[in-house]
Structures are given as C-alpha cells and as structure tokens.
C-alpha cells in the first residue's frame, strides 16, 4: 500500500487553506487520512464552528471507507438512502454523505488517502480539497 507521509499531508492542508483564503471562503476545517484510515493531519481555522473538524473527518473517512469521493456518496444517499444509512452504521457513524470528501490518488490511480473539508458550501469545500491535493503533486477523485 502506498504511503502518505506527514509532509505531504501538511502540504495538502496548507494549500487547501491558502485556496480558501484566496477565494474568500468561510473558515475551514481540513482532515487528511492515509490509505489505512489513520489521521495524518487535522487543522481548523480560527472562526470555524464547533463540530467542523468532525464533519471534515466524516467526509474524508466515508470516502476512504467506500472507495469513492463523497460527491458519489451523496448521489448514493439520494438514490439508495438505506444503503448509505447502513454504511454509516458500519463505519461507526464516520460518514458524511455530501461533497467535500476527496480521495487522494497517485498517478497510477492507487488510493493514498482522503481529504475532508468542512466550513463553506460543500462545492467550495471540495474545490479547496482538490486544490490541496493537486498542490502536493497528486491526483484528486471527488466522486463526480
């Protein structure tokens, strides 16, 4: 299994937050997991609401657990709500089925981990995540 090191995870966080500031997004929380589901980096900007980090973690962990970006999980929730409810239970409640959970892949398509962002609109959260992943020289998969 390819490894996502701490330096790369921190690059993703820094670049995602820079994108958010450059675009005037609301304060964000960013969570980065490696492929085995271990948290590699977690940051919340000043001014985020109380549970933004947990929501960001749920977006990323859910994407990693199901192997698809959370945009695809959102579609599943609309089309197959009982499946998503069961999957949420199966992963211990750590699944937030809205955009903003993005898989991190290498150039060959291997999953290295996932990023979850929460704080602005789901589309803006996803955009910041994708920007962070690209800044680290990796490939993003939002599940679109």
Image (tube, helix red, strand yellow):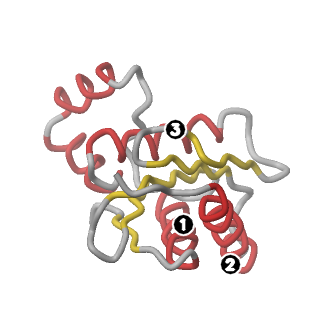
Q: Residue at horizontal 46%, vertical 55%?
A: 3
Cβ–Cβ below 8 Å for labels 1 and 2?
A: yes
Is 143 on the left or on the right of 137, as rendered? left
Describe the element under mark 3 as helix, strand or loop: loop
Indicate whether 7 appears above or below 43.
below
Callout 2: few (<14), some (14-19), or many (20+) C-alpha neighbours within 10 Å?
few
Q: Nearer the viewer, mark 1 or mark 3?
A: 3
Q: Which circle's residue, 3 or 2, is located before the other in the chain?
A: 2
Work out whether residue 57 or residue 80 is closer to the camera in this orientation and state it: 57
Asked if the residue under mark 2 is in contact with the one under mark 3, i.e. CB atoms within 8 Å, the reply is no
The residue lying toward the viewer, choosing from 14 and 75, is 14
Residue 99 location, x and y as percent?
A: 41, 55
Q: Give the secondary structure at mark 2.
A: helix
Give the quarter of the figure containing the C terminus: bottom left
Q: Residue at x 26, y 28 (%)?
A: 87
- 41 relative position to 65: left or right: right
Counting residues from the N terminus, which is met first, the one under dot 1 or under dot 2?
A: 2
Which residue is drawn at the image coordinates 56% and 51% (left, top)?
32
Percent position of residue 136, x then y: 56, 74
Residue bearing the label numbered 2: 23
User: Mark on residue 22?
Assistant: none
Question: What's the CA distance linking mark 1 and mark 3?
Answer: 25 Å
Q: CA distance from mark 3 to mark 2?
A: 30 Å
Count residues near mark 3 (Cα–Cα under 10 Å), then give few for <14, some for 14-19, many for 20+.
Answer: few
Q: Of helix, strand and loop, which one carries label 1?
A: helix
**What's the mark number on residue 124?**
1
> Vertically, is 53 above or below 18?
above
Residue at screen point 43% across, 53% down: 113
Q: Does 104 sit left or right of 10 as displayed? A: left
Sequence-first disc among 1 and 3:
3
Q: Mark 3 highlights which residue?
A: 38
* Residue 78 figure quarter: top left
């Amino acid at each position: 299994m390819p490894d996502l090191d701490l330096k790369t995870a921190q690059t993703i966080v820094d670049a995602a937050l820079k994108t958010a500031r450059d675009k005037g997004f609301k304060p964000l929380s960013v969570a980065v997991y490696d492929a085995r589901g271990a948290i590699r980096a977690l940051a919340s900007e000043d001014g985020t609401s109380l549970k933004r980090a947990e929501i960001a973690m749920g977006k990323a962990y859910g994407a990693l657990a199901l192997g698809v970006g959370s945009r695809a999980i959102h579609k599943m929730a609309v089309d197959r709500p009982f499946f998503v409810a069961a999957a949420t239970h199966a992963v211990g409640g750590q699944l937030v089925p809205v955009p903003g959970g993005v898989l991190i892949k290498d150039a060959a398509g291997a999953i290295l981990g996932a990023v979850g962002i929460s704080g602005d609109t789901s589309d803006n959260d996803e955009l910041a995540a994708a920007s962070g992943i690209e800044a680290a020289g990796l490939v993003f998969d939002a599940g679109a």
